[in-house]
Image (cartoon, rainbow, N blue to C red):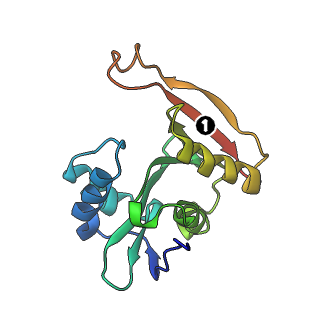
């Protein structure tokens, strides 16, 4: 049985009016940490050039969102904060399409590396960023714990592993 979803998607940078829907999408994508709607509004306004979303062209439903920013003290580094893909669009390569589209945008001109943090058990994120390292980088990347479960989260969240990918 073919379970492929045939979606017509529009990939674009967000607008401030997308912030509320971004917040709803992230809430549907457990176990992602939800931010306040205000935070997502600011991402869609102040960081719109380094964020990307995907919406269903047929019904306008938001199906994917990547939030990222260029690090202020290292502007050649794009820090990917969050990747949210609606269950309707998972397994279709949408996260990679969003990330590739973002990396090819004017706002990412001069970016020479990507950084992100991932918990050890997030197989989907590891798969996404390892594919980027393989296809666009040196194939490896550098990993180390950035935020420790006990020291930084007082045991309330899992450790976040920084994954740094030099781009080729």
Q: Is residue 49 left or right of residue 100?
A: left
Of residues 121 and 64, which is closer to you in this image?
121
Say which residue appears at 38% left-offset and 78% top-offset: 56
Which residue in the rendered view is the most extreme toward the bottom? 58
Q: What residue is shown at x 65% (from left), y 58% (from top)?
A: 110
In the rendered image, residue 165, in percent from the top left (x then y), is placed at: 67, 44
Q: Quadrant of residue 15?
A: bottom left
Identify residue for label 1.
Answer: 163
Residue at 32% x, 41% y: name it. Answer: 33
Residue 106 x %, y %: 56, 69
Q: Dividing the image into 4 quarters, which one contains the C terminus?
A: bottom right
Towards the viewer: 116 or 70: 116
Pointer 1: residues within 10 angstroms few (<14), some, or many (20+)? many
Q: Position of residue 18 (x, y in %)?
A: 27, 68
96 relative to 133, above or below: below
Residue at 32 percent of width and 22 percent of height: 156
Q: Nearer the viewer, residue 60 or 105?
A: 60
């Amino acid at each position: 049985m073919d379970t492929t979803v045939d979606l017509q998607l529009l990939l674009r940078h967000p607008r401030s009016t997308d912030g509320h829907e971004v917040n709803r999408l992230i809430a549907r994508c457990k176990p992602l940490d939800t931010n306040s709607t205000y935070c997502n509004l600011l991402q869609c306004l102040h960081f719109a050039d380094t964020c990307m979303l995907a919406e269903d062209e047929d019904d306008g439903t938001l199906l994917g969102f990547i939030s990222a920013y260029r690090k202020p003290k290292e502007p050649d580094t794009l820090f990917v904060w969050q990747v949210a893909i609606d269950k309707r669009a998972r397994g279709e390569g949408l996260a990679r399409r969003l990330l590739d589209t973002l990396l090819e945008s004017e706002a990412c001109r001069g970016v020479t590396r990507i950084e992100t943090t991932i918990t050890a058990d997030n197989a989907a994120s590891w798969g996404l960023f390892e594919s980027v390292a393989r296809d666009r980088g040196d194939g490896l990347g550098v990993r180390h714990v950035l935020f420790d479960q006990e020291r930084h989260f007082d045991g309330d969240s899992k450790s976040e592993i920084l994954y740094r990918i030099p781009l080729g």
